[in-house]
Amino acid sequence: MTGTISENLLNIHDRIAKAAKRAGRDPGEVTIIAVTKMVEPKRIKEAISAGIRVFGENYVQEAQEKIGKFKEKNLKWHFIGHLQKNKAKLAVELFDLMHAVDSVELAQELNKRSKEPVDILIEVNIAKENTKAGIDPEGAVKLARAISAMPNLKLRGLMAIPPSFEEPESSRPYFAMVRRLAERINKEKLPGVYMRELSMGMSNDFEVAIEEGATMVRLGTAIFGTRMVSEKKAVKSA
């Protein structure tokens, strides 16, 4: 994307609408999460002016600095990175939704640190890649059962990142697997578990993800363009 943030979002909304139509879905079912890792506050304000209300951050400390600068009451902040247990207390204070719960131990820590119920997603390593975080599909079912017994956690769905492909279409089987896994967990009718959200699809493949049932797409480059700040300058730990 090389246009302004407003122009990029107009293009994104058009692509979402077309993808939803192909799948017989309402585009209103799809939430855009603007990924703001290494994005300066000025550009986040531009995104707010262009209508974005949900933002995703990868690092707790970086997010803490940013969130304090925005006083708009209708904004929501999602944590989409790998969360370390020692940051759980701060994370539950800052974020409206945790996308990447991938172990019983992390879930227990979040449950312990939450003063009121917090919405979470289970991160699934759908292709069982050694280089990615997340729990394998069978483990996700067991984790969902464990979470259902934790009173301060509300499991709302799944998050996944498929293998990286040049062709977005190659991601389709993995997105379909995530959808079927959510359906499988829903059939167990676990107390307090409502698998309504599928956080899948990023700037290069979000249209395919929507066609396969995504309700949340995490977009960074598609909105803000290529980040100019070196990754090395980012906060290293979550």
Image (cartoon, helix red, strand yellow):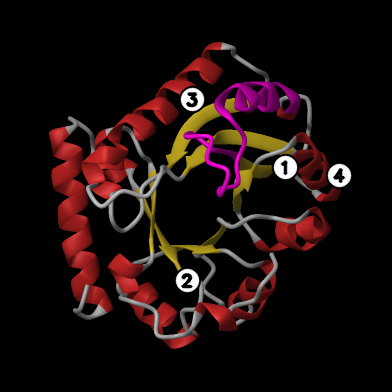
Q: Residues within 10 Å of mark 1 (few under 14, many from 20)?
A: some
> How many angstroms separate mark 3 from mark 4 (CA)?
25 Å
Which circle's residue, 4 or 1, is located before the other in the chain? 4
Residue at the spot x=39%, y=79% of the render? 227
Tell me the quarter of the picture where residue 180 sits: top left
Q: Secondary structure at mark 2?
A: loop
Residue at the spot x=58%, y=84% of the render? 233
> How many angstroms separate mark 1 from mark 2 (CA)?
25 Å
Could you say which disc has been placed on residue 117 in the image?
1
Could you say which disc has been placed on residue 4 in the image?
none
Location of residue 210 with respect to 140 vertically, above or below: below
Q: Identity of the amino acid at label 4?
A: Lys
Of 134 and 93, which appears nearest the observer? 134
Q: Are marks 2 and 3 in contact (CB under 8 Å)?
A: no
Front tag of 4 and 1: 4
Could you say which disc has been placed on residue 36 in the image?
2
Q: Residues within 10 Å of mark 2 (few under 14, many from 20)?
A: many
Residue 127, magenta (yes or no): yes
Location of residue 192 with respect to 29 vertically, above or below: above
| Residue 43 on image: x %, y % | 39, 83
Q: What span is in magenta?
A: 121-146
Which circle's residue, 4 or 2, is located before the other in the chain? 2
Q: Identity of the amino acid at label 2?
A: Thr
Location of residue 4 with respect to 162 vertically, above or below: below
Which circle's residue, 1 or 3, is located before the other in the chain? 1
